[in-house]
Image (spheres, helix red, strand yellow):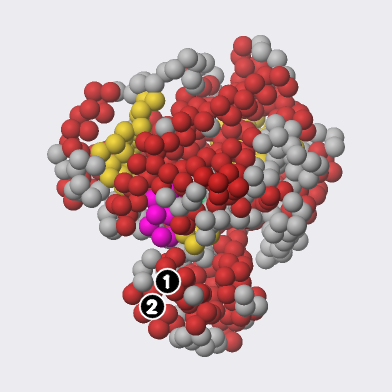
């Protein structure tokens, strides 16, 4: 892409805010005009596009359409929620702050909860934070998309965590204001206001909250949000829902959605801790100042543009050859490595072994609710040394992720072992520079790893334009997204696209009544064990061929983007 073309793209920084831009889609599902050609871009250009997308997070409010991270109303709500947390910190008896979400949102609930409970421990205070992730702890490091559709499971897990508590501040996170699991929890809060105060964090305006019926429930996500809006007037419920712009890869809320979630929660909880333990009042000024620190932090990973592009290219090469990318991390940066790696599976249809994370100290470092998760979830550096290192060579990439506060001797020892097998060894190292806080290292690392894994999969040909083609259709959100993608790319009516999708899911050329009369949860359950469902459906739609022929075509052309283009041309 030439310089002038790029300048032209940058001028479309606000294009998505127009009411005419993909009007039927919420912001979190729109495609970002800045990354329309990301599938054809060089590594350097991919990095620039991701940087431009990330910088949209802190754009100022341009009109009345969307609240932004630093809009007055958002900052006001952050202050009010921080005051609620402060009260609990000052009198934690029978009280709890619960953070909950699905997928990335649940992973960030875990990360933030761990950090702030650790901070309390350092002050000799008892922990007040608990996390819930849909699907339990294995969802921290693997794709468990189905529980996201289960509002009852959400309610039950919240009840269980809060048993015996008299005052609970519940923070439900759903970037798209869409997860039924979270809707169920918010509904429980609304029905028991004497115990629960609900807070919702997400990145769509309330009128864009998902309004599809939830099987077995009388509410939708939107109707829950509307009830919360009523209560928000008397500060009995809180909505924190600025827009941060569409994701670089459409719907990939692990990226900006996840980063903005981390920023907002850390800003609120830090303000509450400062108020409770160092008598620092919660002010608008203080909140804004903290936000600006994060705004500056966004620049750090991209200041190393060339290094990042080179790494992205190296990781892309490893993946193209069918080889591995391994993250070896320490402390919370190690957790971010685990998270980024595990998200490649649902996001890019990657194999579990393609990108894997390992953390020093394994589960002892993690201190997750359920402890060690068994042989399918090996995460320590020892596991890496035994299971992965023996098979590595120069085509596999290894990335060390640490800070100057980690045991550098340990890092060197591991680096020596790795270097015996591969020279493709790199490091992301943070050192104290002025008053850099650990949370800034974390955000930097998150942005860096998200850029690396996204860019590498783009270079591998997993993305078409800026859409994830090979997505797993394992919950209702993904099922609807897949149908919509097929409609956009084939130009065929919705009913035909859904038919093609179901044929690919059930591996049949003719749909039976049994299939067509089943509900979405049966379809998404069946899709768990299927691969390349969307590409197969698209090839069938575009060429009219049978599933077997479509399979053959995709085998001959494993790069999904090229296979799709061949059919389109
Ligand atoms: C997105 C990620 C998903 C989402 C999950 C929850 O990149 O792969 O796992 O985090 O679907 O989404 P939401 O909108 O409820 O936060």
Closest to the observer, 20 or 286: 20
Q: Does 460 appear in magenta?
A: yes
In the rendered image of this protein, does residue 201 appear above or below residue 375? Answer: above
Residue 332 falls in image quadrant: top left
Q: Tell me where residue 249 appears, x and y as whole percent.
A: 53, 53
Judging from the image, what secondary structure is the residue with disc 1 in? helix
In the visual, does 202 lie left or right of 556? right
Toward which corner of the image does residue 327 lie, by quadrant?
A: top left
**Relative horizontal placement of residue 283, taking residue 340 as reference (left or right):** right
Can residue 90 be seen from the camera position used here?
no
Q: Give whichever of 187, 507 is nearer the camera.
A: 507
Residue at 48% across, 51% down: 1
What residue is pinned by disc 2? 553
Q: Are marks 2 and 1 in contact (CB under 8 Å)?
A: yes
Which residues are drawn in magenta?
Answer: 454-462
Task: Tell me the SS state at disc 2.
Answer: helix
Q: Residue furthest top?
A: 279
- Residue at 78% of width from left, 33% of height from top? 73
In-front residue for pair 148/329: 329
Q: Which residue is mark 1?
A: 563
The image shows residue 308 at horizontal and vertical percentages of 39, 38
Decide: is 261 above or below 529. Answer: above
**Residue found 65% across the figure and 78% down from its top:** 493
Who's the residue at 54% across and 86% down the image?
Answer: 511
Q: Residue 257 at what x, y percent from top left? A: 59, 44
Q: CA distance from mark 2 to mark 1?
A: 7 Å
Does the residue tagged 2 have its C-beta within 8 Å of any atom of ligand 1? no
Q: Nearer the viewer, residue 350 or 98?
A: 350
Q: What is the crowding at mark 1: few (fewer than 14 residues within 10 Å), some, or many (at least 20)?
A: many
- In percent of width and height, residue 172 lies at 64, 43
Residue 564 in the magenta stretch? The answer is no
């Amino acid at each position: 892409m030439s310089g002038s073309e790029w300048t032209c793209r940058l001028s479309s920084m606000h294009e998505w805010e127009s009411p005419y831009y993909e009007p039927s889609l919420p912001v979190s599902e729109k495609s970002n005009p800045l990354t329309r050609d990301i599938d054809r871009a060089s590594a350097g250009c991919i990095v620039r596009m991701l940087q431009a997308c990330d910088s949209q997070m802190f754009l100022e409010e341009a009109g009345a359409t969307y609240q932004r991270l630093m809009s007055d109303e958002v900052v006001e709500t952050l202050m009010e929620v921080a005051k609620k947390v402060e009260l609990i910190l000052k009198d934690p008896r029978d009280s709890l702050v619960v953070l909950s979400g699905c997928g990335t949102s649940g992973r960030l609930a875990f990360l933030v909860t761990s950090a702030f409970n650790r901070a309390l421990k350092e002050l000799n205070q008892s922990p007040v934070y608990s996390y819930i992730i849909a699907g339990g702890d294995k969802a921290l490091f693997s794709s468990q998309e189905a529980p996201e559709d289960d509002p009852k499971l959400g309610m039950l897990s919240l009840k269980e965590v809060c048993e015996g508590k008299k005052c609970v501040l519940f923070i439900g996170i759903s970037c798209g204001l869409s997860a039924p699991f979270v809707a169920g929890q918010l509904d429980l809060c609304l029905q028991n206001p004497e115990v629960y105060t609900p807070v919702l964090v997400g990145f769509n305006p309330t009128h864009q909250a998902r309004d599809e019926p939830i099987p077995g429930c009388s509410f939708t996500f939107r109707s829950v949000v509307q009830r919360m809006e009523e209560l928000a007037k008397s500060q009995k419920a809180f909505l924190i829902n600025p827009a941060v712009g569409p994701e670089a890869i459409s719907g990939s809320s692990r990226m900006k959605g996840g980063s903005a979630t981390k920023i907002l929660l850390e800003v609120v909880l830090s303000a509450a801790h400062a108020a409770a333990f160092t008598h620092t009042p919660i002010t608008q000024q203080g909140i804004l100042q903290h936000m600006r620190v994060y705004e500056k932090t966004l620049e750090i990973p991209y200041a190393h543009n060339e290094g990042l592009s080179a790494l992205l290219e190296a990781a892309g090469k490893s993946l193209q050859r069918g080889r591995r990318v391994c993250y070896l991390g320490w402390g919370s940066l190690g957790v971010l490595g685990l998270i980024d790696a595990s998200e490649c599976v649902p996001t890019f249809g990657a194999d579990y072994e393609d990108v894997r994370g390992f953390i020093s100290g394994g589960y002892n470092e993690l201190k997750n609710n359920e402890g060690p998760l068994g042989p399918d979830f090996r995460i320590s550096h020892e596991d890496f040394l035994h299971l992965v290192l023996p098979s590595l060579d120069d085509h596999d990439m290894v990335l060390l992720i640490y800070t100057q506060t980690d045991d550098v001797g340990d890092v060197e020892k591991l680096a020596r072992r790795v270097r015996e097998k591969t020279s493709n060894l790199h490091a992301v190292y943070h050192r104290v520079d002025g008053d850099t806080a650990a949370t800034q290292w974390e955000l930097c690392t998150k942005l860096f790893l998200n850029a690396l894994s996204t860019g590498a999969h783009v270079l591998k040909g997993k993305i078409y334009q800026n859409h994830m083609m090979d997505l797993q259709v394992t919950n209702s959100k993904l099922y609807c997204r897949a149908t919509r993608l097929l409609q956009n790319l084939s130009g065929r009516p919705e009913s035909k696209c859904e038919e093609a999708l179901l044929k690919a899911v059930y591996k049949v050329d003719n749909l039976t009544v049994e299939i067509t009369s089943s509900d979405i949860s049966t379809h998404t359950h069946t899709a768990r064990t299927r691969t390349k469902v969307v590409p197969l459906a698209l090839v069938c739609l575009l060429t009219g061929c049978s599933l077997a022929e479509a399979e053959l075509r995709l085998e001959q052309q494993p790069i999904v983007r090229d296979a799709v283009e061949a059919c389109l041309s």
